[in-house]
Image: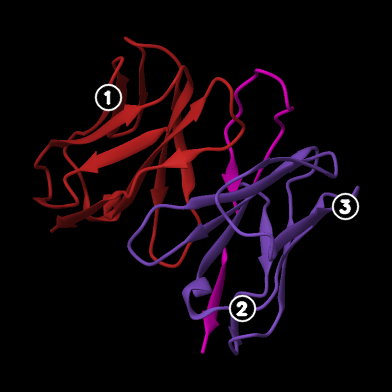
């Protein structure tokens, strides 16, 4: 069964304090790994897709990396507006659905 | 801008009732997926439709059913509502096919369903 776990469950950072979020996954053949940002009461907003180990993608203060067992979302010099829940999801080769992790709730304090 | 819309925004129903939630996908997106998200958890896959046919289903009972229409709109129907059905219901559209390609899913804002 495909599974996704995320750590930490919650993270509080000071503005400018860089850190990383972890997504560990178990899947029988990875088709793609996805990162989303979700603000309270809203739908998830797409950030990145990663397809194979070693791949990296960047967007503003965010950088996503992928290995064969986990993905990291690195946040460099975060700002209060980066506060949100960050969700990781995987899609298996044989399946159509996304399997989501529980998310990491990030708070960036000014 | 994703272009995915959902209605209604909020809904309150009584246990045992039936509910229909609606989604309008982004134009050109032939695939729509529905998810249930309980408070503090990640979205759970309910089912997916591709060109008006169901082509994937998660661990949800048959009282959860859906429809997809040619005009990029879709519905999620839930019969015999239970208290545990209270959640945020999300639809997501993508240009993906039922093949081996991978496409991002773009989510709507969700419908918050409360069952009392």
Residue A3 lies within the magenta run? no
Q: Nearer the viewer, mark 2 or mark 3?
A: 2
Residue drawn at x 31%, y 26% is A64
Write down which chain is painted purple.
B
Crowdedness of circle 1 by 10 Å Cα count: few (<14), some, many (20+)? Answer: some
For the residues beneath circles 3 and 1, the answer to whether they share a chain is no
Crowdedness of circle 2 by 10 Å Cα count: few (<14), some, many (20+)? Answer: many
Q: Give coordinates of residue B112: x percent, y percent.
A: 54, 73
Chain A palette colour: red
Quadrant containing the N terminus of chain A in the rendered view: top left
Range of magenta residues: B92-116
Above or below — where is A81 with respect to B26? below
SS type, badge 1: strand
**In this view of the protein, can residue B109 be seen by the observer?**
no
- The picture quadrant where one finds residue A67 is top left
Is there CB contact under 8 Å for labels 3 and 1?
no
Disc with the residue nearer the chain's start (2 vs 3): 3
Above or below — where is A58 with respect to B73? above
Disc 3: which residue: B69
What is the magenta segment's predominant secondary structure? Answer: loop
Disc 2: which residue: B81
Q: Give coordinates of residue B58: x percent, y percent.
A: 58, 47
Residue B99 lies within the magenta run? yes
Asked if residue B49 lies left or right of residue B44, the reply is right
Asked if residue A100 lies left or right of residue A104, the reply is right
For the residues beneath circles 2 and 1, the answer to whether they share a chain is no
């Amino acid at each position: 069964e495909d599974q996704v776990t995320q750590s930490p469950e919650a993270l509080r950072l000071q503005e400018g304090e860089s850190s990383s979020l972890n997504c560990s996954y178990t899947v029988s053949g990875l088709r793609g790994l996805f990162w989303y940002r979700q603000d309270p009461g809203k739908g998830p907003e797409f950030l990145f897709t990663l397809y194979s180990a070693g791949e990296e993608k960047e967007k503003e203060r965010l950088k996503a990396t992928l290995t064969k067992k986990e993905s990291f979302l690195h946040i460099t010099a975060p700002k209060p507006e980066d506060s949100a829940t960050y969700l990781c999801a995987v899609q298996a080769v044989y399946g159509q659905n996304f399997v989501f992790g529980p998310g990491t709730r990030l708070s960036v304090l000014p | 801008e994703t272009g995915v819309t959902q209605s209604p925004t909020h809904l309150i129903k009584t246990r045992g009732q039936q509910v229909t939630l609606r989604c309008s996908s982004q134009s050109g997106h032939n695939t729509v997926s529905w998810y249930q998200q309980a408070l503090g958890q990640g979205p759970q896959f309910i089912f997916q439709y591709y060109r008006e046919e169901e082509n994937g289903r998660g661990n949800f009972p048959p009282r959860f059913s859906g429809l997809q229409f040619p005009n990029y709109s879709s519905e999620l129907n839930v019969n015999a509502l239970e208290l545990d059905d209270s959640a945020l219901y999300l639809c997501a559209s993508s240009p993906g096919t039922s093949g081996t390609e991978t496409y991002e899913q773009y989510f709507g804002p969700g419908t918050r369903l409360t069952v009392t």
